Amino acid sequence: MSRPVILGVIFALLATSSSLAQAADAQTNKIIRVGFNPGPYKEQFEKGVVPFLQAKGYTVEFKDFSDGIQVNDAVARGNIEANIMQHPVYLKSVNERLGIDNIGIVQVPTPPMGLYSAKIKQLAKPEAGTTVSVPNQPSNEYRAALVLQSLGWIKIDPKSDPATFSQRNISENPYKIVLKEMDNAQQVRALPDVDYGLIQGNFAVSSGMKLASALKLEDPTSNFINVVTIAGKNKDAQFAKDIIAGYHSAEFKNYIHGQSQYSGYLLPDYFK
């Protein structure tokens, strides 16, 4: 074995050992490190759940990530204990892509995807060639297509898999709507450049948009309510049980019900 290869193996082992040591230290000292993407979930967790966890002796640390792949990889490697930023369909697609076993343990209040426009104030039959921006991730493009289908603008092949969805799965497009795929974070800025944008709720509200300003909100479905995600190996860990208890607590429910900015959110079943 050559010297560069040996050094590469050594560095990989050291990195793995460091991650394992950090994870072990976090559990010994009751530290919960939680990762987030842009959106409302950090504030929900910080103000509605963290006080519950602190009362149980935990220290909570926040980590910000720019995309969903990095934050899921960090959970799988033990660099953080949990993330709060994704729905189960997206989680499944990332697990398959990375070959990891992250799991959702509890749903969280989630702003729905909405159809927005900077040009059009009232929904009407679309003109031929109408442009609609959609997320460039298969599962979220599927969500966008469902909204368009609910309006009667397109039809989706009923055999479509949300995790691998593409525009090839659109079976009918009578108005010749042009779907422009783009990064979620760019959709709000690009809204003046298209006729409509189907924008995920977290990116809309984090940009100051009101859910009430949407021309159409997606229909509620549990597959697209976001979840707290942890590594599968930690499903029985005490910190996971305590996070679940924090979300189920009366304090968290009272916090959500008492904040007007969460009006219109998709709420988990434990709110009923």
Image: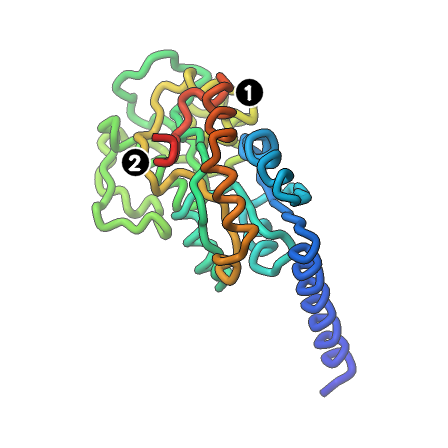
Q: Residue at x 58, y 54 (%)?
A: 75
Above or below: residue 199 compared with residue 22: above
| Label 1: few (<14), some (14–19) or many (≥20) C-alpha neighbours in 10 Å | few
Point out residue 152 in the picture as x, y percentages from the top left corner.
22, 28
Furthest residue in direction bottom, as rendered: 1
Q: Which numbered disc covers residue 99?
A: none
Name the residue located 70 percent from the left edge and 53 percent from the top edge: 29
First in sequence, mark 2 or 1: give its number: 2
**What's the residue type where badge 1 is placed?**
Gly
Q: CA distance from mark 2 to mark 1?
A: 25 Å
State the residue in front, 268 or 226. Answer: 268
Q: Residue at x 49, y 42 (%)?
A: 245
Estimate the x, y position of residue 20 in percent, counting from the top left.
Answer: 67, 65
- The image position of residue 141, as x and y in percent, is 39, 40
What SS does tag 2 mark? Answer: helix
Q: Give the quadrant of the C terminus.
A: top left
Check residue 146 in the rendering and tell me which mark sits there, or answer none. Answer: 2
Residue toward you, 110 or 156: 110
Relative to 192, 178 lies left or right: left
Q: In the shown orientation, is residue 206 left or right of residue 21?
A: left
Eye-nearest disc, 2 or 1 = 1
Looking at the picture, tell me which residue is in the foreground, 262 or 54: 54
User: In percent of the image, x 28 and y 46: which residue is there?
Assistant: 169
Which residue lies under the disc numbered 1? 208
Write down the quadrant of residue 127 in the picture. top left
Q: Secondary structure at mark 1?
A: loop
List x then y, in percent, for residue 82.
56, 49
Amino acid on which disc 2 is placed: Leu
